[in-house]
Amino acid sequence: MKLITAIVNKEDSRAVCNELLKHKFYVTRLATTGGFLMAGNMTLLICTEDEKVDECISIISQFCKQRTEIVPGTATMGLGIESAMPMEVTVGGATIIVTNVERFEKL
């Protein structure tokens, strides 16, 4: 068994979760906040068999595309730095971590 932890943009999370559920993956969603832009994310926890990891990651990659957005000039960029002008930043995509699961029980 593997635990897939996928951090995705909150705007992508609904489509990703719906598709994962269609393919019989069980997903737990946690609302999280990113560091640089302090933007909303969803952290998805998916436990699956080893042979289904690639299928799961493929589904996530289909629905989590990177895109550029303009961030207002009043956005705080973490570390106390503020931008005086609007900035174009890349958002979206996914950060995926796969770890071994020593024991899994569904009660």
Image (cartoon, helix red, strand yellow):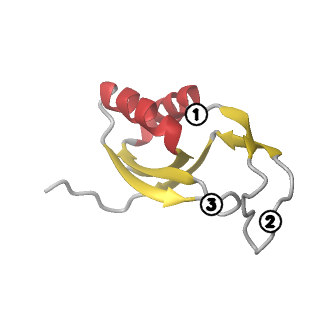
Viewer-side label of 2, 3: 2
Q: Is residue 97 left or right of residue 43?
A: right
Q: Earlier in the sequence, mark 1 or mark 3?
A: 3
- Identify the secondary structure beneath mark 3: loop
Labels 2 and 1 touching (C-beta < 8 A): no
Q: Is residue 36 left or right of residue 102?
A: right
Of residues 58 and 94, the one nearer the viewer is: 94
Q: Residue at x 45, y 33 (%)?
A: 16
User: In the rendered image, which residue does mark 1 sit on?
Assistant: 64
Above or below, 32 relative to 57: below
Q: Residue at x 33, y 36 (%)?
A: 25
Can you give x and y, in whole percent of width and height, for residue 71 in the image?
A: 74, 47
Viewer-side label of 2, 1: 2
Q: Count the marks.
A: 3
Above or below, 95 relative to 84: above
Q: Is residue 4 visible?
A: no
Identity of the amino acid at label 1? Cys
Q: Earlier in the sequence, mark 2 or mark 3?
A: 3
User: In the rendered image, which residue does mark 2 sit on?
Assistant: 82
Mark 1 neighbour class, 10 Å CA radius: few under 14, some 14 to 19, many 20 or more: many
The single residue placed furthest to the bottom in the displayed view is: 80
Q: Residue at x 68, y 42 (%)?
A: 91
- Identify the secondary structure beneath mark 1: loop
Labels 1 and 3 touching (C-beta < 8 A): no
Task: Give residue 38's mark.
Answer: 3
Task: Give residue 101's mark.
Answer: none
Above or below, 24 relative to 104: above
Identity of the amino acid at label 3? Met
- Distance (Cα) linking label 2 and label 3: 12 Å
Q: Is residue 84 left or right of residue 39?
A: right
Of residues 12 and 56, the one nearer the viewer is: 12
